[in-house]
Amino acid sequence: MIMATTTSTQDSGLLDEILPDFEEDSGCVPKAVAVGSGEAMEMGEKGDADVLLVHSPDAEEQFMADGHGVNREPVMHNDFVVVGPPSDPAKVADADDAAQALKRIAQQEAGFASRGDDSGTHAKELELWEEAGIEPTGDWYLETGQGMGETLTIANQKQVYTLADRGTFLATSSLESEIAFEGSEDLLNRYHVIVVDGEGLNTDCAEKFSEWVISPAVQDRIAEFGTDEYGEPLFVPDAAN
């Protein structure tokens, strides 16, 4: 069973935590391909993935409307955070919302590392720039074309800001960067599981995974994941909501 998913589920360590148990419980052998949400859905459209675990709601709804998915179920959420140098040169900490935080970064040309990879995180970033009325260009704006962990490392090395999911930020060690802004409504980050519709796919295992990951036992594990190591869970289960 090929599961196309996001780099955040891989970088946070969640997949390593739960997939071996899915294999044991189901008899299915999962292979996770961690890419951006956009690329994951392209894999689904081409028939190169059996199931998706992604976090780009608008693109997911279009994927379903275009007939590429059998079903789509909520799995969990965390949130995005604006990460930056401890000195917070753009003074984003007291911004009213994330769009204003990014606007301050642009106005100060304080430096921003974008994933630039059509991921769910990249889609959220572009949405925030649009809300801020900013078209990010110039030497201060760097597109890494990399996943979340790599982009966090680059932002840390260059002492610039970036947008990250909280789980990957907490799971990425040895960063001097800190959370500069968090907590506004526009930073919610929801994940869904989608069984892909198509000929020749392993729909049986895909449906088993979809049912398994939203089961109460696995949702409880998601609720606890990260607590021992980071003092807080990296994800909040959503299947019961």
Image (tube, rainbow, N blue to C red):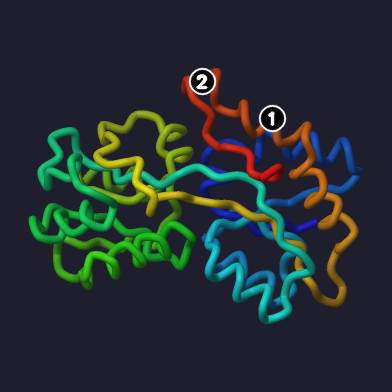
Residue 219 in the image, given as x and y percentages of width and height? 71, 36
Relative image position of residue 142 (x, y in whole percent): 25, 61
Local secondary structure at mark 1: helix
Q: 237 or 20: which is nearer to us?
A: 237
Residue 34 is drawn in which quadrant?
A: bottom right
Residue appearing at x 69%, y 70% in the figure:
44
User: Where does the N terminus fall, quadrant-wise?
Assistant: bottom right
Q: Position of residue 33 (x, y in %)?
A: 64, 56
Give me the residue at 55% from left, 57% from top.
55
- How many other residues sit within 10 Å of disc 1, few (<14), some (14-19) or many (≥20)? some
Q: Is residue 222 above or below residue 186?
A: above
Q: Which mark is residue 201?
A: none
Q: Which residue is identified by label 2?
A: 229
SS at badge 2:
helix
Q: Is residue 22 left or right of residue 229?
A: right
Residue 221 marker: 1
The residue nearer to you, when weighing 128 against 12, is 128
Name which residue type carries label 2: Glu
**213 to the left or right of 23:** left
Residue 225 relative to residue 105: left or right: right
Above or below for 147 versus 177: below
Q: CA distance from mark 2 to mark 1?
A: 14 Å
Residue occupying the point 85% across, 77% down: 199
Q: Amino acid at mark 1?
A: Arg
Q: Quadrant of residue 51?
A: bottom right
Specify which label sits upstream in the sequence, 2 or 1.
Answer: 1
Residue found farthest to the bottom: 66
Tell whether 162 sits left or right of 105: right
28 relative to 52, above or below? above
